[in-house]
Image (cartoon, rainbow, N blue to C red):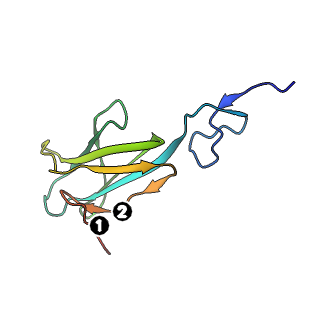
Amino acid sequence: MECEYIGCTNKKAVNSNEGANTDDGSRQFKVTFRVDMWTTNCATRISADLTSDAGLSMEWANDSLYKYTAALHAGMHTFHYRMEDGTAEGLSHEISLDTSLLLNVVFFNSWEARTG
């Protein structure tokens, strides 16, 4: 009789457990959020129910681009960006997660993707 080892059996997940033979549904995927703050001339934060910290500081990447990478559970996630002073953009972004993602760079307070 084979022993049951519970864990994440999804090979694409960052928490994949090669020893597991019974899936526990704990799939987590890497997501990189990116926002261009050029129009605001300030740093940014991301606000969402992504982790226990609802206001995560984003890392400066280059020029006016900020990014944050997190391991999130599969499913729907809603988030928005905030300026350093706490001012939130007037819209929300939503992603459906079933694999790791590098999100398009968007301008602050816009769904428009930055090109170039």
- Residue 20 in view, yes or no: no
Q: Is residue 55 left or right of residue 4?
A: left
Q: Secondary structure at mark 1?
A: loop
Give the answer, above or below, for where 50 lies relative to 41. Answer: above
Determine whether, in the image, residue 94 is placed left or right of residue 9: left
Q: Residue at x 26, y 64 (%)?
A: 63
Q: Residue at x 80, y 24 (%)?
A: 3
The answer to whether marks 1 and 2 mark residues whose Cβ atoms lie closer than 8 Å is yes
x and y percent of residue 7 in the render? 64, 31
Q: Quadrant of residue 45?
A: top left
98 vs 49, nearest the viewer:
98
Amino acid residing under circle 1? Ala
Q: Is residue 109 above or below residue 6?
A: below
Mark 1 or mark 2: name the one nearer the start of the chain: 2
- Foreground residue, 24 or 106? 24
Question: To which residue does mark 2 refer?
Answer: 104
In the rendered view, would you say 108 is above or below 77? below
Checking the image for residue 113, the label placed there is 1
Q: Which quadrant holds the C terminus? A: bottom left
Numbered tag placed on residue 49 in the rendering:
none
Q: Amino acid at mark 2?
A: Asn
In 3D space, how far apart are the residues under numbered discs 1 and 2 (Cα atoms)?
Answer: 6 Å
Taking the image as shown, residue 54 lies to the left or right of residue 87, namely: right
Q: Can residue 11 be seen? A: yes
Q: Quadrant of the N terminus?
A: top right
Q: Residue at x 28, y 34 (%)?
A: 54
Dot 1, crowdedness within 10 Å: few (<14), some or many (≥20)? Answer: few
Q: Position of residue 33 (x, y in %)?
A: 35, 53
